[in-house]
Amino acid sequence: MPSTPTPPIAATSWTFAETYVAEDHVLAAARERAVEVGVAAIGSGGGAALRFLASVLEARAVVEIGTGTGVSGLWLLRGMRPDGVLTTVDLEAEHQRLAREAFTEAGIAAQRVRTIPGSALDVLPRLTDAHYDIVFVDGDKTEYTAYLTEALRLLRPGGVVVFDNALWHDRVADPAQRDEETVAVRDLTRAVLEHEGLVPLLLPVGDGLLLAKKEWQPEHP
C-alpha cells in the first residue's frame, strides 16, 4: 500500500522552524535594505539551510545568482571555509553596493567576495568549469532551467545547485496556475527530478528550496 503523507505542520511549528536559527544585527540590517529597495531576500530558514550546506561541503568556491543586498551571501559566507570565495552576480550594481556594505559590516575580507554586475546568462559562461562547490540561484524565474544547465557545467562532481522560490508562493503545486514564472519553476522541478545525474531534494523552507547534488560520473577512456 502507498504510504500516507504526513499531515502538514501547524503554522506555529513552521514559524518556529523558520526562525530557529536567529539572525544577528548585520543580517537584520541587510534585510531592511532589501525591503527599502524592493528586493525579496531569502528567509532566515532558507539562509540557515544555505549556511549548513556550505559548512557540510566545506565550500571553497560558490556562485550566487542574485546578489540582492547580501542576505543570502552573508549566510553562505558564514558557512564556507575561511578562505572561501563567493562570486555573486546581479543586474543591479546598486544592490551589489549595498551587499558590499553588509559584508564589510560582518567583517568579511574584501577578497572573499567577487561581485559581478550583469545578466547571469552573460556572466556564467565566463566562469570556470567544474570549479564550484555550490551554485545558489535566486534570479529570473523564467531563466531557471537555463541556470540549471550552466550550474551543471560549473559544479564539481559532488557539488550542489540550490534554487530559491521553488514553490513560488504555493503556485507550483497548483496545476491551474499557468503564468510564465510558475510554469518555468514547475518545468525546473521536473527537469531536476528526471535528470539521471542529479540527486534531488525539495524542501518546504521559506518559499521552497530545491537542491540537487551533481553525481560523480565515471571517466570514459
Image: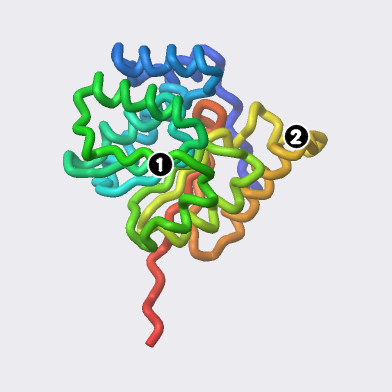
Query: Which quarter of the image is occupied by the C terminus?
Result: bottom left
Percent position of residue 64, x then y: 42, 41
Q: Where is residue 146 shown, x and y percent of the image?
A: 59, 53
Q: Residue at x 28, y 35 (%)?
A: 77
Viewer-proximal residue, 36 or 17? 36
Q: Tell me the residue that label 1 is attached to.
A: 116
For image coordinates 43% across by 15% down, the residue present is 33
> In this picture, is 89 found above or below 190?
above
Q: Toward which corner of the image does residue 10 lie, by quadrant?
A: top right
Instruction: Give, as a three-letter code, the residue at label 1.
Output: Ile
Residue 123 in the image, given as x and y percentages of width and height:
47, 50
Q: Is residue 209 visible?
A: no
Element under disc 2: loop
Q: Quadrant of residue 175?
A: top right
Mark 2 vs mark 1: in front: 1
Residue 191 lies in quadrant: bottom right
